[in-house]
Image (cartoon, rainbow, N blue to C red):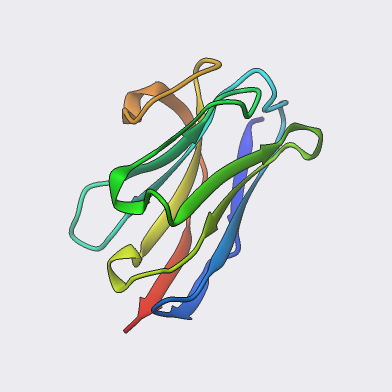
Amino acid sequence: QVQLVESGGGLVQSGGSLKLSCAASGYSIRPHAMGWFRQAPGKEREFVAAIAWSGGGTYVADPVKGRFTISRDNAKNTMYLQMNTLKPEDTAVYYCARARYATSGSGLDEYDYWGQGTQVTVSS
């Protein structure tokens, strides 16, 4: 059974940092691209970042470019999202997801398994 579990969320002041983790079980993440998405109250789920199967290719959404870094450790079956210089508008539930293929983009339909999410709240 494929399972993705996010951790590392919390409450942080504007300008602060958090590092999210996504631990996978039930399968190896190695052949798959992985992604992070977020959903703020009253808004649609939006793409944050994606990383190819090898970790060699990353794709980051414009609102977080230069502040967020996506990475993965295939040996640990885990993906990460380092979030720096956080802003109140980054407040959302953050979800990790497994892509269907070795590379992926920003479309929700490119991902087939999702975690339950972890709350990130940035105070001003």
Q: From the viewer's side, name the closer residue of 61 and 100.
A: 61
Q: From the viewer's side, name the closer residue of 100 and 61.
A: 61
Q: Toward which corner of the image does residue 74 lie, by quadrant?
A: top right
Q: Is residue 31 above or below residue 59?
A: above
Q: Toward which corner of the image does residue 33 lie, by quadrant?
A: top right
Q: Toward which corner of the image does residue 47 lie, by quadrant?
A: top left
As drawn, which residue projects farthest toward the right? Answer: 75
**Quadrant location of the N terminus?**
top right
Q: Is residue 82 above or below residue 22?
A: below
As drawn, which residue projects farthest toward the left? Answer: 42
Q: How many numbered discs?
A: 0
Q: Is residue 52 left or right of residue 67?
A: right
Q: Residue at x 39, y 79 (%)?
A: 14
Q: Which percent across, then down, holds residue 2? A: 63, 31
Q: Residue at x 34, y 31 (%)?
A: 106
Q: Is residue 116 among the parts visible in the rendering?
A: no
Q: From the viewer's side, name the closer residue of 20 and 16.
A: 16
Q: Residue at x 44, y 57 (%)?
A: 67
Q: Residue at x 41, y 69 (%)?
A: 86
Q: Is residue 55 left or right of residue 11?
A: right
Q: Which percent across, then down, holds residue 94? A: 43, 54
Q: Is residue 92 among the parts visible in the rendering?
A: yes
**Quadrant location of the C terminus?**
bottom left
Q: Is residue 41 above or below residue 4?
A: below
Q: Is residue 10 above or below residue 49?
A: below
Q: Which percent across, then down, holds residue 26? A: 72, 31
